[in-house]
Image (cartoon, rainbow, N blue to C red):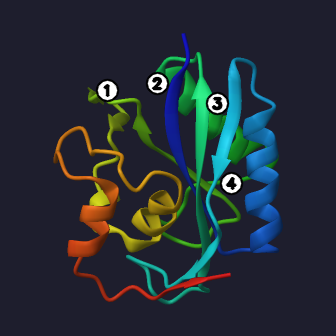
Amino acid sequence: METDAYIALGSNRGDRELNLLRAVAEIGKMHGCRVTGVSAFYETSPVGVIDQPSFYNGVLRLATELPPRELLERLLHIELEVFGRIRTVRWGPRSIDLDLLLYGSMIVEEEGLIVPHPRMAERRFVLQPLCDLAPGLAHPVLGQTVAELLKTLRSDESVVKV
């Protein structure tokens, strides 16, 4: 049985747009997964460590047979093996960042895996592209739709459609 999962994509090193497109292709090649939607890409200001280049961000919808933990492990494998990502500075520059935002309406709290993503409702660079794909999708914990969360978000992030 397939479940819709939403994956955030981000890049601020190298060819940012190509990195996002390559990540979509790599995710689409995973066994037991089908990419069923990709948002527009947005150029966004960095959050956390602000002294770094701006990001390109997007969100991908995935129909998957994989359980959440295995899906996360495969996303981390793509970050490391395909893009050579080494995590040294939290929220620092990276060629790709893949975050599991939502997995159906499931709530997961395990070591190294929290779904829904714990900071997604605070980030315009996640909510704006997610709203492109699923404005009426309800956050499983907060109970508000993506569109409602975006409308009430207070943030100084700049987000520009590419």
Residue 57's disc number? none
Q: How far is disc 3 from disc 1 in space, using C-alphas? A: 19 Å
Q: Position of residue 26 (x, y in %)?
A: 79, 41
- The residue shown at (75%, 27%) is 30
Q: Which of the two discs, 4 and 1, labels the residue nearer the N terminus?
A: 4
Label 4–label 2 contact, CB within 8 A: no
Mark carried by residue 68:
2
Element at badge 1?
loop
Which residue is depicted at the point 31% across and 26% down? 106
Q: Amino acid at mark 1?
A: Met
- Amino acid type of the residue tagged 3 in the rendering: Arg
In the rendered structure, find residue 85 and report the number of the disc placed on it.
4
Q: Within 10 Å of the Cα at label 1, are there few (<14), some (14-19), or many (20+) other Cα atoms?
A: some
Quarter of the image where the N terminus is located: top right
Q: Are marks 1 and 2 in contact (CB under 8 Å)?
A: yes
Instruction: Say whether residue 2 is visible.
Output: yes
Lower sequence index among marks 3 and 2: 2
